[in-house]
Structure formats: structure tokens, C-alpha cells
Amino acid sequence: MIQKILLAVSGLGHAEEMMKTLKEMPSILSAKVTVLHVVPPQSTAAAMTDKWEEGGKILANAIQSLNLDPSQVSSILRQGDPKDVVCQVAEEMDADLIIMGSRGLKRLQSILANSVSQYVFQLSSRPMLLVKDDIYVKRIKRIMVASDNSEASTNCLKIALFLLQGVEGGQLILSHINTDLGGKLSGITDIKPERNSVLGNAVAEAEKQNIPVRCVTSSGKPGEEICRLAEELNVDLLLLGSPDRRPSIAKKFVDLDRLIGASLSDYVRVNAACPVLLARTVG
């Protein structure tokens, strides 16, 4: 399911740490990794030369840090607008997953600071794993999926089950946020879902693959509760579905609702205390 990974590096090291952690998982062992660094245009030829040299060093350091089998890793150094180039390369290589670092900028800060990761998520339909600068990347054993009735959530479940294959001590956590109770519940409540419900079917699929599963529920604002559950349950990776609300004619235009922080995915991207994998529906 994940055989081709695009790792966009900036020299900070967070995305590389995430990639090394993923490579410890049995399901990712055979995946091919393309390491990309984008050199933005410069005003002078001398400055451009310096940036190319710097970019080459960043790529070399990233590949050395990853310490992968040479047959599994390749590198690309390209000039252009980073957010456009990342999307282009992802399409060219037909990437199954994009991994990027993120500053976790809030609302309009993403626009004002020209956030590359936020724009790439807007413009690409591919799953994207964001690693904020201020979090600690841990070995992945506990994966939480924010579950609802959407196709995007179902896609997240498939990705989570794929990642957890063969992980010793691995656990799938299915969370459901009830928005109809006005915050009357507090804390984390374990639930046993009905057999033919969304969660029930997810549990059955996990058990079929011998993956331990736990179902929890809470109430309140979805974004806040998802982040709280992930932190309290010591989750290593959070998967969240983000349905594409834009009509096909507008695919090239950024979804401003998300950019200004009005969406669930934007809130979780900014506030989660663990890496977040955002996925849309199955293409």
C-alpha cells in the first residue's frame, strides 16, 4: 500500500527522523524513498550557486542520516517554488506518501509565512505525514484513527492497518467524538461498538489481521478532543481523514477555509502533540 515515499527535506532533520522511524516498521521495509530538496529562485547567479551547493549538502546529509540500502533511496535537487515542486515530484513518481516537516503555523500565519506543507496538503490528493518542529518522534506502536462515516476515515483505517502489520506490541486505537452531548462526558470512555456499525466493522477488520484494537469515545469539539485523546493515550501517530470539499474545477485553488483554520484537519495539524498523517478518500 505504501511502496513509494517522497521525503521533502529542509535541513532541520525532523522529516528524516520520521522516515527512519517508519523504516523500522515491517510494512515499510521494502518501500522506495525519494529524498527531495527544493532550491528557491535567487536574485543573483552567485546567490543561486550558493543555494545549489547548500542544497546538495542538505541532500547528502539527509541520505547519510537515513542510512538506507542504496537500492532503496534516490535523491532529487530541483529549483523552483517549493510547494509547487513537491506536488510535481509527487505526481511524477506517483508517491504513496509525502513526508514533510511543519512549523505548525496557525490560521492566517500559514498564508503570511507561505507555509509549504499546508499548501502541499491543499494541492495534493496524496496522503501526507506532517512532523512539527516541536514534537518528539517516537517509535510507532500506538496508532490512533479519528473515526467517522467518511470515505477519508475509511482510507485512514486501511493505512493504519497496513502500517501496524507485524509490529510487535502494536495497537490500533479507534476514536469517536460525540458532538451531540454538549460536553457532558468527561475523560476517556472505552466502548464496545455494535457489530455492524462503522467502528464495529473496523474492529472486525483489525481482529482479522490479528492487530489489537481499542475503541474510545469522548464528547466536545472534535479538534480539541482528538488532540486531547491522542496526548492522554500516548499515541505515536495520529491518522485523520480530510475529505476534499473542492469541486474538480477548483483543484488548483487553495481551500481558504482550511488555510484560515476553519477546518478540523487544520486544527489537528497545528495542535496535535504527535506526528499527523492526513489522508483524503481513496483515489
Image (cartoon, rainbow, N blue to C red):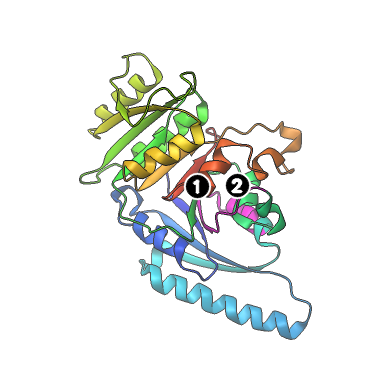
Residue occupying the point 69% across, 58% down:
114
Label 2 or label 1, whichever lies nearer to me, is 1
For residue 96, say whether it is visible. no
Q: Give the labeled residue for mark 2.
A: 121
Q: Is residue 257 above or below residue 93?
A: above
Q: Give the labeled residue for mark 1.
A: 271
Residue occupying the point 71% across, 56% down:
112
Q: Is residue 17 above or below residue 122?
A: below
Q: Considering the numbered disc 2 on the image, is that residue within a helix, a strand or a loop?
A: helix
Q: Considering the numbered disc 1 on the image, is that residue within a helix, a strand or a loop?
A: helix
The dot on residue 23 is none
Start and end of the magenta stretch?
85-107
Q: Is residue 219 above or below residue 9?
A: above
Query: Is the residue marked by circle 1 packed among few (<14), some (14-19), or many (20+) residues within 10 Å?
Result: some
- Say if the magenta span includes residue 87: yes
Question: Where's residue 256, x and y in %?
Answer: 71, 41
Question: Where's residue 88, x and y in %?
Answer: 65, 54
- Residue 225, located in which quarter of the rendered image? top left
The furthest residue to the bottom: 46
For residue 104, say whether it is visible. yes
Quarter holding the N terminus? Answer: top left
Q: Is residue 230 above or below residue 193?
A: below
Locate residue 234 relative to residue 267 in the image: left or right: left
Quarter holding the C terminus? Answer: top right
- Say if the magenta span includes residue 58: no
Residue occupying the point 25% across, 43% down:
170
Query: Is the residue marked by circle 2 packed among few (<14), some (14-19), or many (20+) residues within 10 Å?
Result: many
